[in-house]
Amino acid sequence: MHKLRDAPGEAEEDLRSHIENMAGAGRIYVLGLGNTDRADDGAGILVALALKKRFPAFSFSEHDGIEGVVLDISEKEEDATVFFVDAANICLAPGSIKLIPKEEIKDTEITTHRVAVALMAAMLASSGKKTVVVGIQPETIEFRGGVSEPVLASISKIVSAFLEPMTRANG
């Protein structure tokens, strides 16, 4: 498990390095989860939407019907890593980022998603795909609230950290 939080000057580089190491040589998909009506809970969707501009075939949000996307990826004959990006209570300072490999995703997680991440990760694993959760500690999940500054900074950091590895992996 990798925890990152505003280490002076190197946090984005460290995050990119961790993403590359966890992804290996295959394709990289980013699936953003959350609820944009609940302030910081929409962080995963905002990451996916930003990456979709550069990588429309490799970045998806819950708005795209994530269950179908997971099924499509699981049926592809390719080496791939799927990164689920979501706000998560990781018990760290707001805006903190934690990379959680599939082996550390709890099967008994409580979720507001239609399909639990653990179930989607298991489906992907059964087809040989690797999965990682990129958790972002929210500051607020107030209904109709704005995204907090620490989470906005983390969204930017995550998007930047994925650019080079996704360009290299997905052409």
Image (cartoon, rainbow, N blue to C red):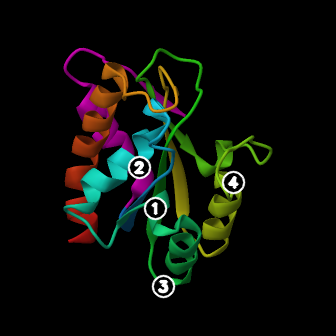
Q: Earlier in the sequence, mark 4 or mark 3?
A: 3
Disc 4 target residue: 116
Within 10 Å of disc 2 (Cα), the crowding (few <14, some 14-19, many 20+) is many
Q: Earlier in the sequence, mark 3 or mark 1?
A: 1
**1 vs 4, front mark:** 1
Residues in magenta, as a range: 1-24
Q: Position of residue 40 (x, y in %)?
A: 44, 31
Image height of 26 relative to 20, above or below: below
Where disc 1 sits, the SS reads helix
Disc 2 target residue: 45
Image height of 135 relative to 20, above or below: above
Total labels: the figure holds 4
- Is residue 22 magenta-colored? yes
Report the Cα–Cα distance between label 1 and label 2.
Answer: 8 Å
Q: Earlier in the sequence, mark 3 or mark 2?
A: 2
Report the Cα–Cα distance between label 4 and label 2.
Answer: 16 Å
